[in-house]
Amino acid sequence: MANEPQKGSPEWEQALQTLATQRARIMLLGARDVGKTTFAALLANRQLGHGIRVAVVDADVGQSEIGPPTTIGMGLLEVPVPTLHAVVPRAIYFVGSNTPRGRMLETVNGVRAMVARAVEAGAESVIIDTTGFVSGASARRLKCAKVEAIRPQFVVAIQRKDELEHILRPLQGRSCRLIRLPVPETVVTKSPEMRQQRRMMRFFRYFQDSRSHTFALSQIACEGTWFNTGTPLEWNEIHFLQETLRSRVFWAERSWEHLFIITDKVVDERALGIVEETFRVAHVTIAGVHRFVKLLLGLLNAEGDCLAIGILERIDFVNRTITVRTPLRDASQVAILRFGGLNVRPDGKEIGAVKPGEI
Ligand SMILES: Nc1ncnc2c1ncn2[C@@H]1O[C@H](COP(=O)(O)OP(=O)(O)O)[C@@H](O)[C@H]1O
Ligand SMILES: [Mg+2]
C-alpha cells in the first residue's frame, strides 16, 4: 500500500499482529533512531484497520510529529497515515524545551494529561511514542514515572543490544506486558544537525501564519518564571538597585524572601550580597533581558489547556504589557502564559536556551 510506512522485521510483524486488536494503552520505548515513531504509525494504522478508535500521544518533544516541537501532542486517527506527522493534533501540552532534561515534571504531567484527553475524546486505544532519552539515572526515573502515569498494558521496547534493560527489568514486576523488539537494519540515523534542522522546519511552518497579540500584565498570569508573580518595587528602590548593580534595571519585583530583577548586564557577586542584605531576602534572581528575547511560551486557557504556543516579541516594562506572536487567531481565551526554556525566531532558528529557575 502506497500510504503504508516501511515494514519491519518478522519480529515487528508478529508484534503488530499481536497488538493490532488490543484496545489498550501501548507505550513505546527505545533510544534514538530505532524505529519507535515508525512502529507507532504502523500500529496505529493496523488498529484503525480493525475498527479501533485509536489515538497517538507524541511525547517526543525534540522530534515532534504531532504538534510543534517542545510540546506533547495528541491526535486521533481518522484515516490511515503515511507517517505520524499526518495525524492532526487535537490537544497539545507545552513542555517548553526540546528535551525532557530539566523539565521532567512537565513531561510526565504532559503525558498523563494527553492520555487523559485521548480517552475523553473517545479513544479505545492509546499509543504513546516517547523520546530517545534512555541512558542514565535521569532517563530511568523519567521512563519509570511515565509508566506510573500512563499505566500501560503493553510496553514495546525496541533496542539494539540491551540498552533498555535497566528500565525494563524493574517493569517486570508490573502486570504490563513487555514486548522486546530488535532494530530493523534499514533504519536511518539522524545527526544532531539534522534533528535541529527538522525542528527548525517544524517551527517555521508552525509560525508561518502567525500574528501578534498584546496582553496587559495585570490581566494575565505568568507561569514558569518569577516575572509578574510578585510586587513591583518602587522607583526609589529601583534607583538604588541601578546604583548598586551598576546596571540598567528594567524590572524588579519581590515575593516571599525573593527578589527578581531584569537587567541589561551581568552583575558581580559582591553587589548581589549588598542587595540581599538591603532587601532582607534569602534569594535574588537576576536575569539579563536578552533571556526573554524570542522566548517560547505556552498560551493556556483558564482550565490550563494549551491553546497554542507563541514567541515572546516584546515586554513593555513601562506600560506593563507583553506581546506574543502566535498562530492562534482569537486570543480572548488566553488566561495564562507559560514561560518555556527555548528562544526561537519565527523562522524556526533556535537562538538560546533558559533553564528552569533562571528567569
Ligand atoms: N522498519 C523500518 N524499515 C525501514 N526504515 C525504517 C524502519 N523503521 C524506521 N525506519 C527509518 O529509520 C529512521 C528512524 O526511524 P524513527 O521511526 O524515526 O525512529 P525513532 O522514532 O526511534 O527515532 C526513519 O527515517 C525511518 O523512516
Ligand atoms: Mg521518534
Image (spheres, rainbow, N blue to C red):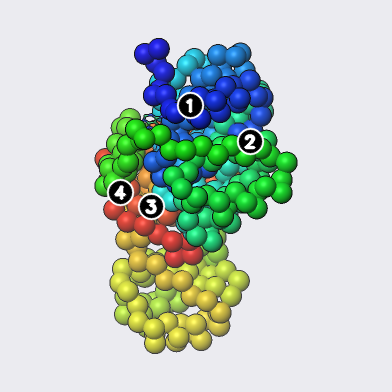
Which residue occupies 39% across, 87% down?
Answer: 270
> Between marks 3 and 1, how big is the CA–CA gap?
41 Å
Q: Which disc is residue 342 wearing?
A: 3
Vertical side of 61 occupied by 19: above or below: above
The answer to whether any part of residue 215 appears in the image is no
Q: Is residue 214 left or right of residue 200?
A: right
Disc with the residue nearer the chain's start (3 vs 2): 2
Residue at which label 1 appears: 10
Q: Which disc is residue 192 wearing?
A: 4
**Residue 230, horizontal then vertical, whole percent:** 55, 64
Q: Nearer the viewer, residue 63 or 163?
A: 163
**Mark 4 or 1, which is nearer the eye?**
1
At label 3, counting other C-alpha atoms closer than 10 Å, the crowd grade (few under 14, some 14-19, many 20 or more) is many
Query: Amino acid under label 3?
Result: Leu
Disc with the residue nearer the chain's start (2 vs 4): 2
Residue at which label 2 appears: 154
The answer to whether any part of residue 108 appears in the image is yes
Disc with the residue nearer the chain's start (3 vs 1): 1
> Between marks 3 and 4, how big is the CA–CA gap?
17 Å
Query: Amino acid under label 4?
Result: Pro
Query: Amino acid under label 2?
Result: Phe
Which residue occupies 62% across, 18% down?
Answer: 52
- The image quadrant where one finds ligand 1 is top left
